[in-house]
Amino acid sequence: MKGANRLDFELRLVANMQWAMRDLPQRHISRTFGRIFVPVDGDGPEVVERLARVCGIVSLSLARRAPLDIEAILAVSLDLARENIRPGETFKVETRRANKKFPLTSPEVSRLGGAHILGHMPEVTVDVQQPQRTVHIEIRDQEAYIYVDSVSGPGGLPVGSSGRGLLLLSGGIDSPVAGYLAMRRGVRVTALHFHSFPFTSERSREKVVDLCRRLSLYGGPVSLYVAYFTEIQKAVRQNCPEELYVTIMRRMMFRLAEHWARETGCLAVFTGENLGQVASQTMESIAVIGEVCRLPILRPLIGMDKADIIAWARRIGTYEISIRPYEDCCTLFVPRHPATKPKLAKVVESEASLDIQALLAESMARTEVVRVGGDEDTGREDTGASPLYKATWTEQENREDQGDSGLDRPGPRVLE
Ligand code: ATP
Ligand code: MG
């Protein structure tokens, strides 16, 4: 992927970095091979905190500049050592010389730097094997950059470099983590949430908006589609055998997911499913449910343990939002004995009692779009435009983003 695409990746990363700093003072970001330079002016810690979340960034270093002169480089190194290395700590100096014209070699610069710091700071010691702190000196064409230690970024790919995906986002712990992992592989996420007002409250919807806002910190705004699911749930409950509620309800979800994915230029559907966690996540259920959707269904959490997922949720800051107590539509009408091994023929037969087309059409017409994390984000429902208009807009934006996928965009697929 790297060679020819490198420039695209870097430009996209820079755009995402600019987005993450959009409310801070304007600054010019520059690139040289493998490095991106962001000038800071007293706001370094704030900038580092923002950028440490941007997918595609491996590490960040708050550096100070020095002219290409060994005396100046040593002086800045000492200043930084004094500010950062505490008494009793061990350190080493590591030099990278991208500028081969500089008269000293990397080991020579490191040796001089170490000696200079030791000469002025008797309270620290050198350990070249396992130092607690590392003073980095990077000698480039125009100047040198000096920093102590680095902060890790998320790594992965810049959001947008892998195209767009539709995330089925519940208010639970799992699906936001799945969304984050998709973003970290470069996927720009459009979220779809099924809402069963008034069975599920306004608060459960706010929770999902908050989750999207949190996800947007990792690489850009997230469009949230809030799909009306009330009539579907009622119809399934009234007409279908109890043990198949969940199976049939989830098939309805995936039919709508396919529709909205195609509508918004998404190439795949992402879920927070995890094998064996609940009745609908057995191999048999996954197969029967996924059968209605012709787009790839990707499940980044499929093999994880719940404890790993929770650790991720805490790390990315979605856990505290997810554990707010509001009902999710999936926890409504949960049958006492849901089928763990549903049979497709039986499911299809049970669905015959539903007017699937009409139910899907009604949900589509009543679906709302919230653009979360954008400049115009108010956290409230977007009433400025009809859902249809917004959907078209998103699709257009996406075409510009990555070129048309070439997949056809038929209406929702319904089981004949
Ligand atoms: P989560 O913690 O993400 O809610 P879960 O373990 O509770 O997952 P389920 O409730 O069976 O499992 O849901 C499985 C997946 O289906 C979720 O991870 C999510 O991707 C999708 N999903 C469930 N409910 C909704 C909903 N109301 N809106 C959108 N997607 C949903
Ligand atoms: Mg759930």
Image (cartoon, rainbow, N blue to C red):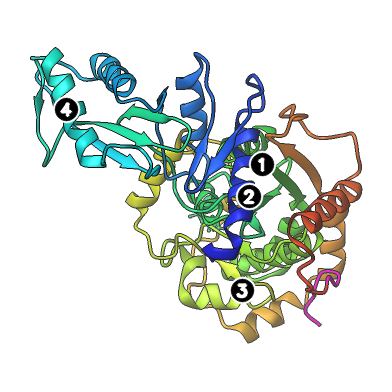
User: Cβ–Cβ below 8 Å for labels 3 and 2?
Assistant: no
Label 2 belongs to which residue? 329
Q: What element carries label 2?
A: helix
Residue closest to the far bottom = 345
Residue 103 position within the rendered picture, expressed as x and y whole percent measured from the top left: 31, 37
Q: Give the range drawn in magenta.
A: 409-416
**Is any atom of residue 210 visible in this view?**
no
Quadrant (top left/top right/bottom left/bottom right) for the N terminus: bottom right
User: Cβ–Cβ below 8 Å for labels 2 and 1?
Assistant: yes
C-alpha gap between disc 2 and disc 1: 6 Å
Q: Is mark 4 on a helix, strand or loop?
A: helix
Label 4 belongs to which residue? 114
- Crowd band around label 2 with a 10 angstrom C-alpha radius: few (<14), some (14–19), many (20+): many
Determine the residue positioned at 57% across, 50% down.
Answer: 158
Q: Which of marks 4 and 2 is in front?
A: 4
Q: Does the residue labelled 2 lie within 8 Å of ligand 1?
A: yes
Residue 153 position within the rendered picture, expressed as x and y whole percent measured from the top left: 43, 40
- Compared to 268, does 315 lie above or below? above
Horizontal side of 68 relative to 44 (left or right) equals: left
User: Cβ–Cβ below 8 Å for labels 3 and 1?
Assistant: no
C-alpha gap between disc 4 and disc 3: 61 Å
User: Cβ–Cβ below 8 Å for labels 4 and 1?
Assistant: no
Q: Which of marks 3 and 2 is in front?
A: 3
**Reading the chain from its start, which is encountered first: label 4 or label 1?**
4
Q: Is residue 147 magenta?
A: no
Label 1 belongs to which residue? 200
